[in-house]
Image (tube, rainbow, N blue to C red):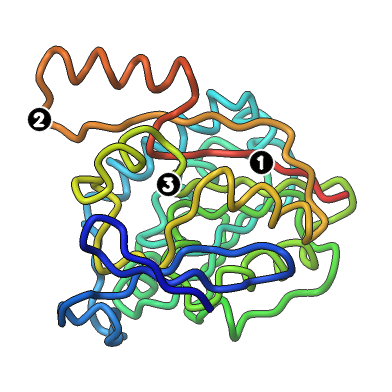
Amino acid sequence: MLKLVVLGRLYKLVKIKKPHYLMAQVPLFNDNRNEEIYDGDTYYGSENSLSAPLTDNAVMDFKQAGIYNNLLKNINFLEIGSGMGGVLRNLSYFGKGHYAGIEPVHKAAIYSNRFVANDYNCKIYHQSLEKSDFNSDSFDFVFSFHTIEHLDDPTILLEKSYKWLKKDGKMLLGCPNFSGLIPRLKPLQWRARNKYHKWLIGTKELFPLLEDYGFKVEKYFTYGGFPAPRTFFQSMANKLFKIINMGDALFLVASKK
């Protein structure tokens, strides 16, 4: 493990799988970053997430990737970190497939089971990814949206997704993009740099790791940079980041080889 300091912030490079490293955030001062972040009775999102913003963002990513209509067919779909169940509700309402989610946080799992799973054709499992298991070749799509950066070991998500996907099945993954221009130029001001994110993951780190775990990236895009509220020039900069694929958020489609 290597340690380095970037603009006054201490990081460590952790070898995940030869020869790749991911950058893990470590506090230079005591900001409780190494303490347990989540507890079983606290949901760190919003109950409005059934509709927005995460659900809307995920659906927009599906549509931009050109896969949304495929998710409405008679397919098996798993979401890792399903939160309040907004994405599952959307797909179950409009789709014909079989939809399931894994959610470890107690309040979110209880809420989504009560108001989503009971009313729509989906199943939500109240358990962690580490303790979850399904038969091999069970799903056509495995989706995870801004979850991988929270995990103690992000490779578990890749390993289990590969196992659970059918041949030629697809992983749909959204996460912060540490390879974007804002993280590179202004890392201390990056909106995704917070104590809830344990890993700084970008295209440079993630793509080789996906290859190692048996995935082929079919398409990806990035967007975002300056958070709202934005000036006119910051809004124009965000549009440029999207055009040149250097945004600070990433969405990709990877197929199981």
What residue appears at the point 35 percent right and 75 percent down from the top-left corner? 110
User: Looking at numbered disc 3 in the image, what kind of residue is underneath it?
Assistant: Phe
* Dot label at residue 96: 1
Q: Position of residue 29 (x, y in %)?
A: 16, 78
Q: Earlier in the sequence, mark 2 or mark 3?
A: 3
Between circles 2 and 3, the one closer to the viewer is 3
For numbered disc 3, what is the local secondary structure? loop
Q: Indicate the quadrant where residue 111 lies.
A: bottom left
- Mark 2 surroundings: few (<14), some (14-19) or many (≥20) residues within 10 A: few
Disc 3 designates what residue? 178
Mark 1 secondary-structure assignment: loop
Task: Kindly report which numbered mark, 1 or 2, lies closer to the viewer in this rendering.
Answer: 2
Amino acid found under the numbered disc labelled 2:
Pro
Residue at image x 36%, y 36%? 56
54 or 159: nearer the viewer: 159
Q: Nearer the viewer, residue 27 or 76?
A: 27
Q: Which residue is mark 2?
A: 229
Report the Cα–Cα distance between label 3 and label 1. Answer: 36 Å
